[in-house]
Image (cartoon, rainbow, N blue to C red):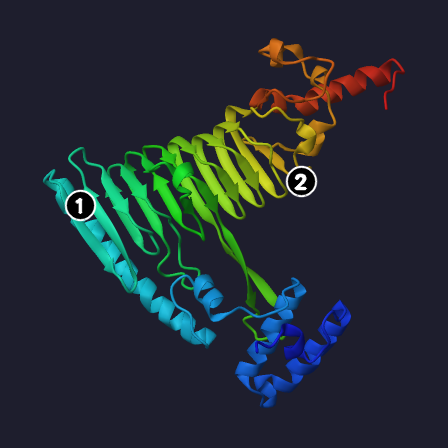
Amino acid sequence: MVESNYEILGIFDGASKREIQEAFRKLALEHHSDRGGSEEQFKKIKQAYEDLKIGKKYPDSDKEKQRKSKVFSGDDEEEIRRRNKIIAKELSQEMKAAEEWAAALNRVNATGTRLFGSKTVGEIELERKANGALSIKGNYLAGSIIYDGPIIMQGNITSPSFSDEYQTNIILTQGDFKFVNPLENKYKIDNGAKILAEDGDIIVGNVFGRKDKVQDPDGRVGIYLTKEHRTELSAPKGKIVLENAVNTVSLNADSIVVLNLEDDVNIFAKEILIYGNKITYDVKIHLKKDGIIRFFENYSIQSLSDDSVIILENGKSFRLHDLKTKKIHDLPDELLSNKEKYDKNDTMVGKGFTITYSMLDNFHKKHSENKTWKTKFGIFSK
């Protein structure tokens, strides 16, 4: 019978948060290696405590451990990391060979198909087509590749969280990077992978980053640090089209078309088109000079997080809260370039609205002038 996390800590099912903490501290002191305890038992106790903090009653099964480790799982954490580093290294070497193979075909404008990797570490098929495009079929798990042309991808893209040496890094010196039917196929990019299209577009599906809690490197019991695996997409001369950007993501392009932005997303663009109804906490929108942000969904700006920030290229910044509490008619007429889109007696509400760089750049100045004028004539408003 599988032992519950409560049983591992020696407390009753449903114990309070304080009782869980006290039980952990007591057992951690008893079993810590500095006191001659068992390292394996200490890890088991620590994991049970972490699980209970998020309401998880039972530890991971072997199948769950294997899924979370992406490639390999075993009983010992250090062994998992060691084996996964070996696998990531093998995959990186395979992708370097793939890069050289594709470049050789490019030089002579030839076509070809070849498998890289293996059934053990993961297999991926590359095909250099007659039009110069490189087709990649299979899940891209680790390693870098540079290609002088467009890439067509069928599969997911991830990066190894267990190694900083063999991160996924895909670079196109020209051409577009595209997923094949990304929404239909549910393809995703995650875990800190990086894609750069130096002179082209990036068209993908969902994009996720990741944050891990890691044990304090000094070995202090109960102290954890946050390790960030930021997924980055960059098309400095083109556009990025994606579905959702979630949890530690950076996007940089001339134009970005996105559905939703959730949890620690940084975007840099001149034109930003948002089709969904979610901009959640810790989102930073960096708007380039003369740029626009266009919202298309029929919803009120009141649903957008107050903690989200718009930052202009000149350094001025605005919390969405500041914009939500002002009215469109507070903005100068010359900045409302398309007046039929707005009712000047209303706040910024649905059926789409546009925020321009000029509108924001003059925002504080306009409100300062209004305040001075009203103060001068003894007129105050709440």
Q: Would you identify the image quadrant in which residue 212 lies?
A: bottom right
Which type of secondary structure does the marked residue at label 1 adopt?
Answer: helix
**Nearer to us in this view, 27 or 381:** 27
Pinpoint residue 245: horizontal percent, then vertical percent: 50, 41
Give the amino acid type for the residue marked by disc 2 in the picture.
Answer: Asp
Bin the neighbour count of mark 1 within 10 Å (Cα to Cα): few under 14, some 14-19, many 20 and up: some
| Residue positioned most to the front | 1
Determine which residue is flagged by label 1: 103
Q: Quadrant of the N terminus?
A: bottom right
**Callout 1–callout 2 Cβ contact below 8 Å:** no
Which type of secondary structure does the marked residue at label 2 adopt?
Answer: loop
Residue 223 visible, this orientation: no
Pinpoint residue 170: horizontal percent, then vertical percent: 33, 46
Judge whether 79 appears above or below 196 on screen. below
Residue 311 visible, this orientation: yes
> Looking at the image, how many numbered discs can be counted on the residues?
2
Q: How far apart are the two marked residues, 1 and 2, measured between alpha carbons?
A: 46 Å
Judge whether 106 appears above or below 328 on screen. below
Residue 170 is left or right of residue 67, and the answer is: left
On residue 307, which mark appears? 2
On residue 279, which mark appears? none
**Nearer to us in this view, 236 or 105:** 105
Q: Earlier in the sequence, mark 1 or mark 2?
A: 1
